Structures are given as C-alpha cells and as structure tokens.
Image (cartoon, rainbow, N blue to C red):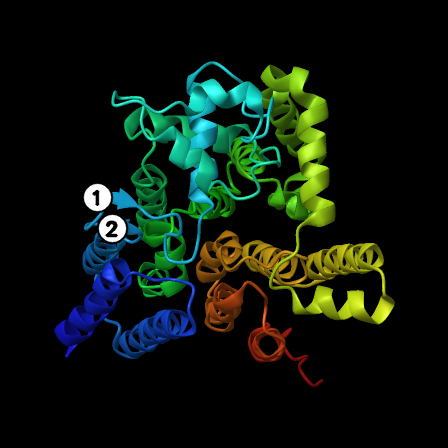
C-alpha cells in the first residue's frame, strides 16, 4: 500500500507537469482536484508514516524532478508564460540578466528603453531575452528583491541563463535541505507538501530559500553570532522577516540585533546610488499591491478607505507579534505563528508566502500553517476571468479562521491547588 501511495502521488505530479493548464474553469478545476488529491495522499501517508529519512528525501526528490517540466511545451520546444498559473519567475531571470551585464537591477524597471539593448534576441548564447522581458509581470515596476535574492538570481543566470529551470532547481535544493533538517516524522509534511511542490519545482518561486534560512536561524539560537548572520541573510532575501524584529530582539538581545542590522545595511552599500529607486519600488509594493486578501477587502469595503485598512492590519500584525512574544510558547512556535499572521493579514496573501512559516511550524510541530495551504488553493480561481470570485474569498477566509481557531496552541492549564 505504501508503494501504491507513492505511485499515486507521482502520477499526480506527472499530470501537473504535462497538462497544458490555461485560464479556463475546467483547467483550474483540474488543477485544484490534483492539488487536493495530493493533500489527501499526504495525510493518508501521514497516518501510516514509518518512513526513514532516506525514503522521505528520495520521494521528495522524485516528486520534484517530475514537476520540473511544468510549464514547458514539448510540442513548441519553449516555456509558456504561466508555469502552472504563476509567472513571477520571469522577473527573477531578468534581474539576473541585468546584473550579469554589470548593471544594477534597481536602476531601471524592465520596460525602460535604457534596457532595450539587453532584450535583443539572437541565435547565440544570449538567450530569448525579448520573450523573457515580455513575460514579466508589472514591467513598469522596479524590482523589490533585496541583494541576497539578487545574488541567487545571478547564480541561476550563470548556470542556466534565460531558463526557469534555474530558479526551480534552486527551490528544489532548498526544499531538500529543509526536509533533511526537520524532525521525523514531520519532515514528511514538507517533503510531500502540495503547496511547496507547486510553488517551487512547478512554478519557480524561490521562497523556500527564505524558509530554509529561518529554519537554520531557530536551530542555531545557541550560536547567537551565526543566528545574527542568518537573520541578516533572511532579511536580505526578502524583507518580510522584519516582522520578526521584536522576536529576534526578545531572544537574542540588543547586541546581536545590532549586528544583524549592521550586516543588513552593509549589504546594501553597493546599491547606495539606487536608494531612491529602491524606496520607490518598496513604496509601490507596500501601498498598491493586493491579492487574495479577504480580510483586507472586507475592511476596505467597511471603511471605504484602503489606506486605513492597510494601517489597521499593520497594527493587527504588530499586536499579534507582541502577544505571541508575551506567550509561553517556544521561540520557533512564536516565529511560525508570527509569520503566519503576517501572511494572513497582509493585503497580498500569496499562497507561496506560507513557505516562510511552514518549516518553522513543522520544526515546532504546529499544524496550522500546514493546513492553511488547503484553502489557499482557491486563490487560483482568479485565472478563470482575471477577478477574484467573492465566494472563493469568503470560503477561504472562513476556512483560514476555522483552522486558526482549531490549531492555535493553547497555554497549559493551571493546576488546581
């Protein structure tokens, strides 16, 4: 039976990597069916578990290798724009391409005429850069990815220029490292996790790298200098771990917080000349981006003011982080739920953002972030007609709230005298 479950899971991966997903209701429903089927197989295997570390790693690698071709058309011999309903990977490739030519990725948005020469196609090893540039989402926006992420994009470019396989393989490497570090049997819940599989090996998101850095951080609390370096690297990969600033200060103190801040600042020095562009890009993201955020949409509708809703939710995230700090939960548990609150209360609730919190949740044996991936699959219904269905947002909100209420850790009961 165990072999049958592995084969069934592998079959879903093959279908996900070979089916030509397009923006139709039938296509989205097929994807959602396969996505939920993988969750069912994961929980079925969890009931039996008993896998060794080697078997978990082997199946994790197998499933990801099967998903690497997702988005590639063998008939056309080319990558499609959407890699299973996602197209962020093209920005990663373009940023690495710009840096490879000695330019700052923060200097111009992809659509800028100043970069036209980098998009000239040829039959040489330069690659299909006109196509890559055309595929980029929001080409008039400056990149918001910090220096450590840019370094990863540059490495992907050096190895596989213009190919989504670069970011996909980077994500696979991070996924396997996370699987190797997590305690048994909880490692299975990452190795077979449908959201991790879809976001990384299938769609080319690299958020698993941030999840790995944060997992290494909590596993190295007893080495505060290394923890400071890891926290700085996490911030330099994405700015979202700023939500853990108070948590880091609480557990590692002012001296190591100052060290992490100093390392973070030093990494930005090569881009000091682009400070205005960097701030403009971040401001555009913070004030304008919204997606799959039922709580934000509800507050915006009630108040009639999106800016007020953003402010309220920012304060709610801060309040949640401080409340968790005052709890008696373990540091990794506090961090996992703090990042979960950051994701769920954000105006842009991208499903792959859960990969920031998932390794920490599994390290501390928390079910909430594992189950969040189930309702977040409803976000893909935006692909049908370009709008977010109210019924999907309402269903997602109800399920996320219910999961939180059921899985959030309760403080130990006080003993009766």
Q: Is residue 264 above or below residue 288?
A: above
Which residue is drawn at the image coordinates 71% and 31% (left, top)?
Answer: 279
312 relative to 221, above or below: below
Using residue 152 as the reference point, say whether residue 80 is left or right of it: left
- Within 10 Å of the Cα at label 2, are there few (<14), some (14-19), or many (20+) other Cα atoms? some
Classify 10 Å Cα crowding around label 1: few (below 14), some (14-19), many (20 and above). few
Q: Is residue 47 left or right of residue 395?
A: left
Residue located 48% across and 44% down the image: 210
In percent of width and height, residue 209 lies at 43, 43
Q: Is residue 51 visible?
A: no
Residue 189 % position (x, y)? 36, 65
Q: Distance of mark 1 from mark 2, alpha carbons?
A: 6 Å
- As drawn, is 342 to the left or to the right of 221? right
Residue at 49%, 40% (x, y): give it.
136
Q: Disc 2 on helix, strand or loop?
A: strand
The residue at which mark 1 appears reads as 77
Which element carries disc 1, helix, strand or loop?
A: loop
Q: Residue furthest bottom?
A: 416
Image marks 1 and 2: residues in contact by CB distance under 8 Å = yes
Say which of 223 and 258 sits in front.
Answer: 258
Residue 417 occupies quadrant: bottom right
Q: Position of residue 19 (x, y in %)?
A: 26, 63
Residue bearing the label numbered 2: 73
**Of residues 25 and 218, the one drawn nearer to the viewer in this rendering:** 25
Residue 145: image x %, image y %?
56, 35
Does 204 appear above or below 122? Answer: below
Asked where in the image residue 410 lies, by quadrant, the reply is: bottom right
Count of numbered badges drawn on the protein: 2
**Quadrant that contains the N terminus:** bottom left
């Amino acid at each position: 039976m165990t072999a049958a479950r592995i084969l069934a899971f592998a079959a879903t991966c093959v279908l996900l990597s070979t089916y030509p997903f397009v923006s139709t209701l039938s296509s989205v429903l097929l994807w959602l069916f396969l996505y939920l089927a993988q969750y069912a197989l994961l929980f079925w295997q969890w009931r039996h578990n008993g896998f060794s570390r080697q078997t978990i790693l082997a199946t994790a690698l197998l499933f990801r290798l099967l998903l690497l071709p997702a988005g590639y058309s063998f008939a056309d011999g080319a990558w499609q724009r959407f890699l299973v309903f996602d197209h962020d990977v093209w920005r990663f490739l373009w940023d690495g391409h710009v840096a490879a030519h000695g330019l700052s990725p923060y200097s111009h948005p992809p659509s800028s005429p100043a970069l036209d020469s980098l998009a000239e196609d040829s039959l040489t090893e330069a690659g299909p850069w006109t196509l890559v540039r055309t595929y980029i989402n929001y080409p008039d926006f400056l990149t918001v990815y910090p220096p450590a992420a840019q370094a990863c994009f540059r490495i992907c470019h050096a190895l596989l220029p213009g190919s989504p396989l670069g970011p996909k393989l980077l994500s696979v490497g991070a996924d396997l490292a996370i699987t190797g570090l997590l305690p048994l049997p909880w490692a299975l819940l990452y190795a077979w996790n449908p959201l991790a599989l879809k976001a990384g090996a299938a769609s080319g998101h690299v958020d698993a790298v941030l999840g790995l850095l944060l997992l290494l951080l909590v596993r190295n609390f007893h080495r505060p200098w290394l923890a400071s370096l890891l926290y700085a690297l996490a911030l330099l990969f994405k700015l979202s771990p700023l939500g853990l600033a108070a948590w880091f200060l609480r557990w590692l103190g002012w001296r190591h917080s100052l060290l992490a801040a100093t390392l973070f600042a030093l990494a930005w020095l090569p881009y000091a000349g682009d400070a205005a562009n960097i701030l403009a890009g971040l401001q555009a993201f913070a004030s304008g981006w919204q997606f799959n955020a039922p709580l934000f949409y509800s507050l915006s509708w009630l108040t009639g003011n999106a800016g007020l809703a953003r402010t309220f939710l920012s304060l709610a995230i801060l309040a949640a982080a401080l409340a968790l700090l005052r709890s008696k939960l373990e540091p990794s548990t506090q961090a996992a739920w703090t990042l979960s609150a950051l994701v769920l209360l954000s105006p842009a609730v991208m499903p792959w953002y859960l990969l920031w919190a998932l390794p920490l949740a599994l390290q501390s044996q928390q079910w909430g972030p594992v189950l969040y991936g189930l309702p977040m699959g409803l976000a893909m219904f935006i692909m049908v007609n370009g709008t977010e269905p109210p019924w999907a947002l309402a269903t997602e909100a109800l399920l996320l709230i219910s999961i939180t209420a059921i899985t959030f850790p309760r403080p130990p009961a006080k003993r009766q005298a």
